[in-house]
Amino acid sequence: MVVGEMRSVSYVQRVALEFSGSLFPQAICLGDADNDTLNELVVGDTNGKLCVYKNDDSKPWTVRSCQGTLTCVGVGDVCNRGKNLVVAVSAEGWFHLFDLTPPPSKHPDASGHHEPPLADEQKLVFKQHIPANTKVMLINDIDGDGKFELVVGYTDRVVRAFRWEDLSESSDHISGQLVLLKKWLLEGQVDSLSVNPGPDGVPEMMVSQPGCGYAILLCTWKLDQQPLPEGGDSSATSREAPVRDVILHQTSGRIHNKNVSTHLIGSIGRGCTKVDAGSGLFALCTLDGTLKLMEGADKLLWSVQVDHQLFALEKLDVTGNGHEEVIACAWDGQTYIIDHNRTVARFQVDENVSAFCAGLYACKGGHNSPCLVYVSFNQKIYIYWDVQLERMESTNLLKILETNPEYRDLLQQLGVDGDDVSAVKDLIHKTLYFPEKQPQNSPCQHRGPAGADSSCHPTVAQDSWNFPTGRASPLQLLLLSLRPGGSQALIWGAKLWDSKGICSESREHALLSPPSLRRDGNEEETGQEMQHEREERSGEMPDEPRWRTDCQAMTFTDCQERAAEPEGTHEAFEAGGREERLIRA
């Protein structure tokens, strides 16, 4: 299905990191590299330099040197020792292992900042040569035995699974090697590796295949069988998978381009469900703009077609409800956020993107938050942190009004049936655009200092809603209090009333905008000039005492309960949380 309308979101909390060099799309990841429960950003470039970034520091926290051109990096317990290690693999086949855990004597400060490791702490923990031409990498439990394996995809359509074998029982030093478990040969290029729960809950190893397809790799090795070391091609051929160990799936009968690049992501969280959910959720995307969410091999939940070239696919819970959204990024920086119900939100980055990843990162505040990471072609890494949405679904004014208890009371006072949608829409339309025709049978009354009743109709400054000037009815006040942007975005002007309840200011008073919005150099002079101009237009000012009624981000009930102040005449405005007061003697 081609996407029609979709929400556009804007994230402004961004950190720019210094990065000189170029990198492959799989040479960037988020993970807890130093085992402090806070995630770091790990980046490897084509010159063999491995950089680790922490918090909001623009410079790397630590830099390591590797042999060869780094094609993929990862963070995980690859040695099954109960702590994370940093893994970097080069195109030439060099496997590097780093332990960045600081000594017990070094503790982070209150903000989560660590001191950079010393020179003697930057030594390489382990290095081994594996088959060359590496492309993608995965650290996960792919056979359900509770231990992590290292899975590597190659440019020659081969996938190999390795497991770490300890040569020493000492927990202080890492001593061992990678041994080959199995080798699979695929029909098409492998662009993604992932694990997804099968129908019986056992993990299934999945690899992407061109044309929006994927393959399930069967892990048929015996746990009690000693795996053979990866010493050469002779040992690897004995474990090359037969055809029955690769189950190919095509998600669509009509494939426009059977060779189009495809990416996938599995084990998408669906929140806390009491009922057995069966197979896990996984998503696929293609370079020609196809997005799919599937449950198992045969159940397609939704399919979306966009007009951008998608090259990266991630999962991230941006709403905080436990349901992970699908995050797809295009080369031009267009990012799509799609939930399980096919609700789409998009976010545009200003620059073209060479690599992308999403996950949790401890940027500020000493805690992990959802983040989007973009690598531009201008040697910059941008981290958009705390990328959260209150909800994915779009809403409208009627739905928002239904949640306010004052709304039903006002409709009843005006004699409008709340269940009559057409009548309610007509009332709201007339209230917003034709306020002078609205009935005045429910004004809010204030008792002035002289004992006279005065109608409190605050004047509302003209804004992006095209809200008309003049007196505001109770329903208008309620509509403004619920408008997008919250109460801090409201701009109110105060009407001035004399002791007889007669408005003493002219209609032009409503056109006054706060000095902070006029962008003039001298705000105080701007306010005084406008004040003198209003005095000239309104003519002679009354001699009777007057008071002010401030309606700064107030609801209708607040306006009713606000007491009049018999002090000097004031005019108050609030814009974006900033208040400017002009006091006239």
Image (spheres, rainbow, N blue to C red):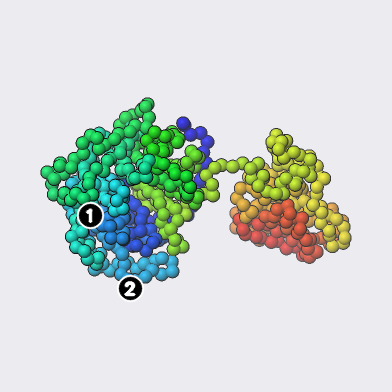
| Element at label 1 | strand
On the question of residue 17 being in view, the answer is yes
Asked which quadrant contains residue 247, the reply is top left
The circle on residue 105 is 2
Residue 473 location (% of width, % of height) = 76, 47
Residue type, numbered disc 2: Ser
Closer to the camera, 560 or 140?
140
Residue depicted at x 75% and y 59%: 562
Closer to the camera, 433 or 153?
153
Q: Is residue 9 above or below residue 128?
A: above
In the orientation shown, which residue stands out farthest toward the bottom? 105
On the question of residue 333 being in view, the answer is no
Residue depicted at x 26% and y 60%: 98
Residue 148 location (% of width, % of height) = 29, 52
Residue 125 location (% of width, % of height) = 22, 61
Please give left or right for residue 33 compared with residue 243 in the image. Answer: right
The circle on residue 164 is 1
